[in-house]
Amino acid sequence: MKHKRQLVQRLTLLALALTLNLQSSTALAQGVGCTNWNGLMTNWVQTGAPGSNWNCIASSADGTVLAAGTYETGVADGNFIYVSTNAGLTWTPTFQGNQVWQSIASSADGTKLAALASRVLGPLYSFGGMVYTSTNSGMTWNESDLPESWEPDASIGWGSIASSADGTKLAVTGSYSYYLGGGQFASFGEILVSTDAGLTWTLSGAPDVVWHAIASSADGTKLAATVYNDPDAAYNGIWTSTDSGGTWTQTSLPETQYACLASSADGTKLAAGVGVGSYGGIWTSTDSGGTWTQTSAPNNQVTWLSIASSADGTVLAAATWGGVWVSTNSGLTWAQTSSPAGQGLGIACSADGTQLAVANNNDQSGIWTAQATIQAAAPALCISQSGNAIVVYWPAVSGWTLQQNTDLLNSGGWSVNNNWTTTNGTNYLSLTSPAGNLYFRLSNP
């Protein structure tokens, strides 16, 4: 009889240990938290940025630092770069000049910024190219030694700028029109790269075509760029480089006019939006541009103005005249958000994809943000054993209750156990020679 009692106790302790280890591993698996993406669809709010014709925006990896540039032609006081260090709650004008801001990029930590500008010449047009950089989140700016033109009488129209995660490698696209006489122009373009945060620039190995958007991997090694409305339509499409711009290869994507481009941190996942053309919609690649797939994003006369990607390429956000569309499965499906309809010329995404910011022009001018909700992770439920004594313990995190059950197959058999004590931030439930099987879990609520 004594032997049988010891055997039952031993089996009880074994069942308890196995159960609690299972619950502990489940809780640890939830340690990354659970993301509710509905906030990106419905929770759009206008930030404190002033109403203006916003043209570009960039974000730090955590979404805390935002930098945006305005595009007002023919204004006496020029245009500004505004910076927010609290995810858009408040904004500070950090730079003013007689130029329009075409594109802006940020390092992962938000300290290094690079902005691409064109000079304002007259009430309607902007020409000439400049790059300004900051190493202190926009408090001060320095102009890069970037060529304004390569040919006499050439009008430079810089397109886009991209940055590595550390802000040291930059790449900028540009195009220019050269007047041939008799009302005829020739259009060309270049891609310039920098490996010292914009102090010096070199010409990349890209062909002389009309370059537009550009995107970079986190290490700056992989680049992708779009050719937009080149006189030779055979060059239109997307080109990629795997050596920081040294050499370029045209991808198999249909030759049309891609207005925007985004890349994952490793450069393997790319997303491109069509501005105009017969091949509409948004296209994605999972092999650094080797092959492409047209997504289910709207493609019927829809002009995609800007696009952004999370670091892993899972979350994509793209803006049109009608608002922002979001995908949380790498472009497989898309949903239109409640963001206001407007000309979303710039859009930015945090590294984890939970925070978005769009820079609107025209009717709904301003900067709008949305944030997904990250639900708290379950505390780890643990067990220790000493002889016949069992201790169940877990961090004393508010909102979680301990429940117990004698049969895992009985889903309605869970009941609350409040017989625990708290010491130094940890909850403890002590059991001595427990009878039968007991299973524990943490529940919220």
Image (tube, rainbow, N blue to C red):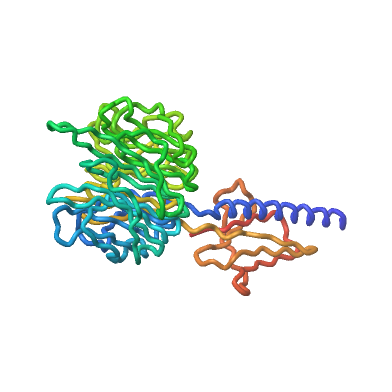
Comparing 210 with 107, the one in front is 210
Instruction: Please state if 341 lies on the left or on the right of 387 as rendered.
Output: left
Comparing 171 with 347, the one in front is 171
From this viewpoint, is residue 440 visible? yes
Vertical placement of 358 versus 292: above or below?
A: below
Q: From the image, which quarter does the N terminus lie in?
A: bottom right
Comparing 123 with 35, the one in front is 123
Comparing 425 with 65, the one in front is 65
Where is residue 44 drawn, in percent x and y? 29, 54
Where is residue 149 drawn, in percent x and y? 28, 44
Vertical placement of 196 versus 386: above or below?
A: above
Vertical placement of 125 versus 298: above or below?
A: below
Q: How many marks?
A: 0
Residue projecting furthest to the front: 152
Residue projecting furthest to the top: 234
Residue projecting furthest to the bottom: 424
Q: Which residue is drawn at 17% across and 62% down?
A: 77
Q: Residue at x 31, y 51 (%)?
A: 116
Q: Which residue is drawn at 44% across and 28% down?
A: 291
From this viewpoint, is residue 274 visible? no
Instruction: Please state if 417 lies on the left or on the right of 363 as rendered.
Output: right
Q: Quadrant of residue 97?
A: bottom left
Q: Quadrant of residue 284?
A: top left
Where is residue 248 drawn, in percent x and y? 43, 33
Where is residue 71 drawn, in percent x and y? 21, 53
